[in-house]
Each structure stands twice: as structure tokens, then as C-alpha cells.
């Protein structure tokens, strides 16, 4: 029997090792391949929102992944989520945006949901997705969005200490206001581990492991 194949589309090469490790641990019987183009996220950040030309190129990559033999496609960037949903309608291969399983899980956990981001272009797509998934589940939610000003610029300049300090402070403040926190970007995941377990009073959700767990069940 032919092994199933997962095609991953990334907007940053830094995400490849993380997802490779997750796939190795959680999808041992699935073959994978990666498509990477960081100009997609650079264009989105420079423009301040997802542009039509960028969305069109996302669709091209989805079609390329399908042509390469993917049985399932995962797009690992939240900022281009709207383009992912549009591209999914153009292929027979199932396409998943990385943050959808996380949004569904957050909606199941609590009514007061916090969304935290370090890039403004990621905040609204993630918040919009959470609202829509709550509506689809027939649940009323109260959403609190928090942008960590300056954290992303610090990370891009190599100042991980400043990035982590800003994100940690925002997480600790948001934990007092909501029932569950959604991380809009995978780059914030490691900061959660620096918060003592006793101080993590509510669930803090990161999309990569939740998405791969979801695909493990889907592709079994």
C-alpha cells in the first residue's frame, strides 16, 4: 500500500525543523515534503494586510503541492490564512490552515478567549478565525486581542531576550483576563516554557502541535 504524503507550505525556513520534528513524532507512517517562500510573509507585513497577488501565489503553491503528490496539505502561516481558505476550493486535495484546530480547541475550552501576536498582520486573521469557528460551533465568546509591540522587530534583529521578555509580560497580563490564550504565531511557543508551571493558570495553545495531532487522526 502506498504511504500517504503530507505537503507543508511555509513562509519561513525557521519553521521547517519544528514541523519536521513534530511529524517525526506524531506522523511516523506519513511521508512529508516542504515548500518554503518567505517573500509571502514579507510582502504581507510590508503591505499591512494580505494582498491579492500574494493570495494568488499561495494558491499556486497549493496546486504545486497537490501536483507533487500530497494527500493532505498544511499551510503553516497564520497571516495568510484567508488565502489558504481560498486556495482550498481550487484543489481536490484537503488543505488545512495551521491555526484552525487550535481555534476549535480554544472555543471548546472557554468563553473568554485571548489572542496574542507580535505582528499586526497575524492578529486579525487569527481573531477572525476564532470568531468564525465559535459561530460555527454555536458558541458566544468574548475575545481579547493583545499585540506585543516591538517584540517581532526585536526577534528579527536577533534580540531574542527582548522578544521573550515582551511576550512573557503580555502572557502574564492576559492570563488574568481570559479562560484560554491562543498564540497567533509559532515563534512565541518557546516563551510559554519559560513561565513556571505554577504560574500558568490557564491553557495556552500553540498551533503547530495541535495541527499535527489533528492530522494524525485525519490521516490515520
Image (cartoon, rainbow, N blue to C red):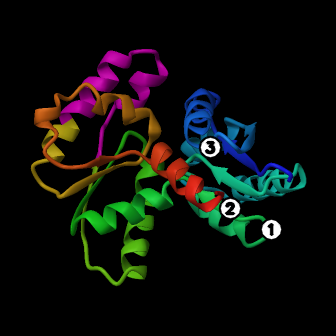
Examine the image and state in which quarter residue 90 appears.
bottom right
Badge 1: residue crowd in 10 Å (few <14, some 14–19, many ≥20): few
Q: CA distance from mark 2 to mark 3?
A: 17 Å
Residue 143, image quadrant: bottom left
Q: Which residues are magenta?
A: 147-169
CB-based contact (under 8 Å), mark 2 and mark 3: no
Identify the disc placed on residue 95. Answer: 2
User: Dominant secondary structure of the magenta stretch?
Assistant: helix
At 86% across and 53% down in the image, what residue appears?
1
- Contact between marks 2 and 1 (CB within 8 A): the answer is yes
Q: Secondary structure at mark 2?
A: strand
- Of residues 151 and 175, the one nearer the viewer is 175
- Distance from disc 3 to disc 1, alpha carbons, whole Å, reads 23 Å
How many numbered discs sit on the rendered protein? 3
Q: Which residue is mark 3?
A: 27
Magenta segment: does it hold 164?
A: yes
Residue 91 is tagged as 1
Asked if residue 78 shows in the view, the reply is no
**Labels 3 & 1 near each other (Cβ < 8 A):** no
| Image coords of residue 66 (percent x, y) | 83, 56
Q: Residue at x 33, y 61 (%)?
A: 106
Tag 3 or tag 2, which sits nearer the N-term? 3
Amino acid at each position: 500500500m502506498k504511504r500517504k504524503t503530507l505537503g507543508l507550505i511555509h513562509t519561513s525556513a525557521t519553521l521547517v525543523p519544528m514541523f519536521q520534528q513534530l511529524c517525526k513524532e506524531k506522523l511516523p507512517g506519513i511521508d512529508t515534503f516542504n515548500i518554503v517562500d518567505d517573500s509571502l510573509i514579507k510582502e504581507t507585513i510590508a503591505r499591512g494586510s494580505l494582498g491579492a497577488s500574494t493570495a494568488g501565489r499561495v494558491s499556486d503553491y497549493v496546486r504545486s503541492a497537490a501536483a507533487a503528490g500530497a494527500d493532505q496539505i498544511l499551510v503553516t502561516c497564520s497571516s495568510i490564512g484567508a488565502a489558504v481558505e481560498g486556495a482550498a476550493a481550487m484543489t481536490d486535495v484537503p488543505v488545512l490552515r495551521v491555526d484552525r484546530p487550535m481555534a476549535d480547541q480554544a472555543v471548546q475550552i472557554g468563553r473568554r478567549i485571548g489572542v496574542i501576536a507580535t505582528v499586526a498582520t497575524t492578529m486579525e486573521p487569527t481573531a477572525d478565525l476564532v470568531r468564525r469557528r465559535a459561530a460555527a460551533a454555536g458558541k458566544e465568546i468574548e475575545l481579547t486581542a493583545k499585540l506585543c509591540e516591538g517584540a517581532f522587530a526585536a526577534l528579527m534583529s536577533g534580540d531574542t531576550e527582548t522578544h521573550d521578555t515582551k511576550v512573557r509580560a503580555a502572557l502574564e497580563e492576559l492570563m488574568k483576563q481570559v479562560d484560554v490564550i491562543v498564540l497567533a504565531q509559532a515563534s512565541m511557543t518557546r516563551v510559554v516554557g519559560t513561565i513556571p508551571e505554577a504560574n500558568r493558570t490557564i491553557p495556552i495553545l500553540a498551533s503547530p502541535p495541535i495541527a499535527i495531532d489533528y492530522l494524525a487522526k485525519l490521516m490515520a
